[in-house]
């Protein structure tokens, strides 16, 4: 129960890696706000997981929506110890110059601007309490990019740099900031990364992962629970590869 008594917000918490992080946090004793653009899915998941799970609909690319999420979290839980910026999207694999401007703008809004908006909404609260942990869910794509996912790769590289500069600035204020970098996993985004979900394409992707399997929501939950716990009190500014050796 390494998060006993802690409170957390997990964006994109109703599916994929976010759902794995939510469950791991609950198992570790935290109270968790499941914040997701799919409010119905968040509500259903919270209902299934019990009294320490709270649902909140949020569009992480919209300032008013993020501010409302932060207010709802503080009203419901009293304070926020942990923020997980997990919500993310990608564009379909294609040459960089063929990605539409609308798709580019959406990737940057959800993967990049959201980190800025949640910081504006919640960093002052954490500074006031001289405590907090922020976890950004980046990707191996930000460290070892795959071709034809150029602007997604770039957004995750930005997130890794943002993590490090946030960590340096906030460390004197008692706030730690880390990132995890998953390899492709069994989530709703997998088909988008691959372009098509076929046995041949899965074999091609798996051949780049030495451990020989995709990452799972449970893998991300275990890593996130550690990095956001007091057991990791000396760890800040890291981009932890949870990738089965993909980036070696």
Image (cartoon, helix red, strand yellow):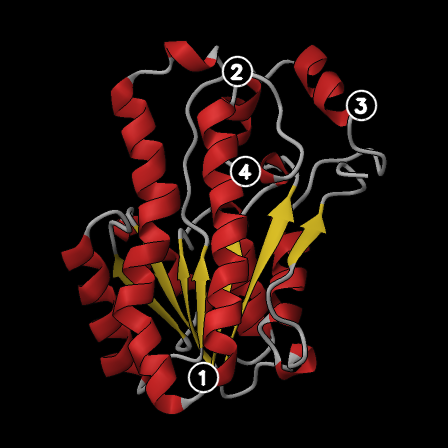
Q: Nearer the viewer, residue 65 or 162?
A: 162
- Of the numbered discs 1 and 4, the one sitting upstream in the chain is 1
- Of the numbered discs 4 and 3, the one sitting upstream in the chain is 4
| Image coordinates for residue 70, horizontal then vertical, percent | 26, 70
- Label 1 sits on a secondary structure element that is helix
Q: Which residue is mark 3?
A: 207
Gap between marks 1 and 3 measured at Cα: 43 Å
Q: Quadrant of residue 65?
A: bottom left
- Label 2 sits on a secondary structure element that is loop
- Of the numbered discs 3 and 2, the one sitting upstream in the chain is 2
- Of the numbered discs 2 and 4, the one sitting upstream in the chain is 4
Q: Which residue is mark 1?
A: 173
Q: Which residue is mark 4?
A: 187
Q: Which residue is mark 2?
A: 195
| Image coordinates for residue 90, horizontal then vertical, percent | 43, 30
Of tags 1 and 3, which is closer to the observer?
A: 1
Q: How many marks?
A: 4
Which residue is at 53% across, 41% downward?
157
| Image coordinates for residue 71, horizontal then vertical, percent | 21, 74
For the residues bearing labels 1 and 4, Cβ distance under 8 angstroms:
no
Which residue is at 52% across, 15% downward?
195
The answer to whether 5 is drawn above or below residue 139 in the figure is below
Gap between marks 1 and 4 measured at Cα: 35 Å
| Image coordinates for residue 34, horizontal then vertical, percent | 38, 62
Gap between marks 2 and 4 measured at Cα: 14 Å
Q: Nearer the viewer, residue 131 or 75?
A: 131
The answer to whether 15 is drawn above or below residue 76 in the figure is above
Which residue is at 31% across, 24% downward?
103
- Mark 3 surroundings: few (<14), some (14-19) or many (≥20) residues within 10 A: few
Instruction: Quadrant for the N terminus, please.
Output: bottom right
């Amino acid at each position: 129960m390494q998060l006993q008594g802690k409170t957390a917000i997990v964006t994109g918490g109703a599916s994929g890696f976010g759902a794995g992080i939510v469950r791991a946090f609950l198992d570790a004793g935290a109270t968790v706000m499941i914040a997701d653009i799919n409010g119905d899915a968040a509500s259903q998941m919270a209902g299934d997981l019990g009294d320490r799970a709270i649902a909140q609909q949020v569009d992480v690319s919209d300032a008013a929506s993020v501010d409302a999420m932060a207010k709802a979290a503080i009203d419901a839980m009293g304070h926020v110890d942990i923020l997980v910026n997990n919500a993310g999207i990608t564009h379909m694999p294609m040459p960089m110059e063929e990605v539409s401007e609308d798709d580019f703008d959406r990737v940057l809004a959800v993967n990049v601007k959201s980190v800025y908006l949640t910081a504006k909404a919640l960093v002052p609260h954490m500074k006031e309490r001289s405590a907090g942990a922020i976890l950004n869910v980046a990707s191996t794509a930000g460290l070892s990019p795959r071709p034809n996912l150029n602007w997604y790769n770039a957004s995750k590289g930005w997130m890794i740099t943002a993590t490090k500069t946030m960590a340096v600035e906030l460390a004197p204020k008692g706030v730690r900031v880390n990132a995890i970098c998953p390899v492709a996993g069994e989530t709703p985004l997998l088909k988008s990364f691959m372009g098509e979900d076929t046995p041949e394409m899965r074999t091609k992707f798996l051949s780049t992962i030495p451990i020989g399997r995709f990452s799972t929501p449970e893998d991300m939950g275990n890593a996130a629970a550690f990095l956001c716990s007091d057991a990791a009190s000396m760890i800040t500014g890291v981009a932890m590869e949870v990738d089965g050796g993909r980036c070696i």
